[in-house]
Image (cartoon, rainbow, N blue to C red):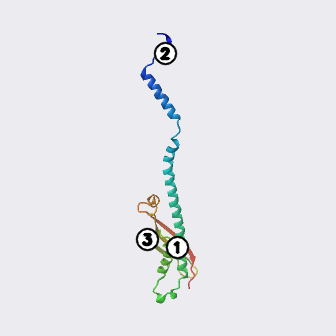
Amino acid sequence: MNERSSELVRHPAESGLRRLAMRAARLARDERGDAMVETLVAFPTLLFVLLLLHQFGYQCAAHVVLQRAAAASTRAAVVYLAESCMDGAVSRPAIVSAAAARVLFASGNFAPDALNVRIEGELSGFSLVTTVVETQFDCSPFLFGAVLCGADRRLPMTAQASLPYQGF
């Protein structure tokens, strides 16, 4: 055999390994499926973050409603006149709680059984009267309500407002 014919005869396992190595190198350079894999990894994460941001924004809006309820209850506390109620059957705390409830429950995401309104300060002269409104925000309509609100899907919220007393 001459030199040239000995170069042409190779071991079968060697040529299979070479073909396998060439195929692996070609697949490593191939980028056809990369975009789909990246999308499959990034999309659920992005969707989760967007839903959490939506829920957080909704909770911020609920806090604004709660602050408005505190302001309405404070206004009811400072302008309440006992003589205006028939026979004095309705007390100041009931009027103040009703004012907060009207604002809160128009929203629909506050638990009606969790409303607590406290009146602080003296109701005389021009002293400062503060009402503290405590309630719970219901996160159950949200897909990931347990993430920001806890396992019971209720977020305790508190707001307060103050005004000078205007009664006699």
* Image mark for residue 114: 3
- How many residues crowd around disc 1 within 10 Å: few (fewer than 14), some, or many (20 or more)? many
Residues 81 and 110: in front is 110
Residues 83 and 98: in front is 98
Farthest bottom residue? 87
Closer to the chain start, of discs 1 and 3, is 1
Q: Secondary structure at mark 2?
A: helix
- How many residues crowd around disc 3 within 10 Å: few (fewer than 14), some, or many (20 or more)? few
Q: Position of residue 144 (x, y in %)?
A: 45, 58
Which label sits in the foreground, 2 or 3? 2
158 in relation to 36, above or below: below
Q: Secondary structure at mark 1?
A: helix
The residue pinned by badge 2 equals 7
- Residue 28 appears in the picture as rendered: yes
Residues 73 and 32: in front is 32
Residue shown at 49% from the left, 10% from the top: 2
Farthest top residue? 1
Q: Which amino acid type is shown beneath numbered disc 2?
A: Glu
83 in relation to 36, above or below: below
Q: Which amino acid type is shown beneath numbered disc 1?
A: Ala
Q: Alpha carbon of mark 1 to alpha carbon of mark 3: how far?
A: 14 Å
Closer to the chain start, of discs 1 and 2, is 2
Q: Position of residue 118 (x, y in %)?
A: 48, 75
Q: Alpha carbon of mark 2 to alpha carbon of mark 3: how far?
A: 89 Å
